[in-house]
Image (tube, helix red, strand yellow):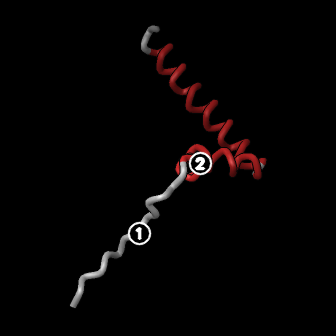
């Protein structure tokens, strides 16, 4: 019996634009451009995250 690989075979001839399109950030921005709710949640998350680190910075005496 031959052992089969379960991994999908990737094409060798991937162009730069295809590789750029596979980036996580590009996918997030494309989804955010289609969804107002996602855009709102991402902006709120960034504000909460940065506010938390500002709070920690102030509590540390900075």
- Residue at figure coordinates x 71%, y 47% from the top left: 32
**Residue neighbourhood size for the residue with mark 2, other residues' Cα within 10 Å, grouped as few (<14), some (14–19), many (≥20):** few
Residue positioned 44% across, 60% down in the render: 12
Quadrant in the rendering for residue 25: top right
22 sits left or right of 36 in the view = left
Q: Residues within 10 Å of mark 1 (few under 14, many from 20)?
A: few
Q: Nearer the viewer, residue 15 or 41?
A: 15
Instruction: Answer above or below: position of 25 versus 60.
Output: below
Q: What residue is rendered at 53% in x and 50% in y?
A: 19
Is disc 1 placed on a helix, strand or loop?
loop
Of marks 2 and 1, which one's residue comes earlier in the chain?
1
For label 2, the residue is: 17
Secondary structure state at the residue bearing disc 2: helix
> Which quarter of the figure is the N terminus placed in?
bottom left
In the rendered image of this protein, does residue 43 appear above or below residue 5? above
- Residue at x 75% of width, y 49% of height: 37
Give whichever of 24, 52 is nearer the camera.
24
- Between 53 and 12, the one lying in front of the other is 12
* Residue 35 in picture, x, y percent from top left: 76, 51
Q: Is residue 56 above or below residue 29?
A: above
C-beta proximity under 8 Å, tags 2 and 1: no
Q: Position of residue 23 (x, y in %)?
A: 54, 47
Residue topped by disc 1: 9
| Image side of residue 14 versus residue 9, left or right | right
Residue 52 locus on image (x, y percent):
54, 27
Q: Nearer the viewer, residue 39 or 18?
A: 18
13 vs 40, left or right, is: left
Residue 2 spot, x, y in % from top left: 23, 86
How far apart marks 2 and 1 lie (CA) works out to 19 Å
Q: Residue furthest left?
A: 1
């Amino acid at each position: 019996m031959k052992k089969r690989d379960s991994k999908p075979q990737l094409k060798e001839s991937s162009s730069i634009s295809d590789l750029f399109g596979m980036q996580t950030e590009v996918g997030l921005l494309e989804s955010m451009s289609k969804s107002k709710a996602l855009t709102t949640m991402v902006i709120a998350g960034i504000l909460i995250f940065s506010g938390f680190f500002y709070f920690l910075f102030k509590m540390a005496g900075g």
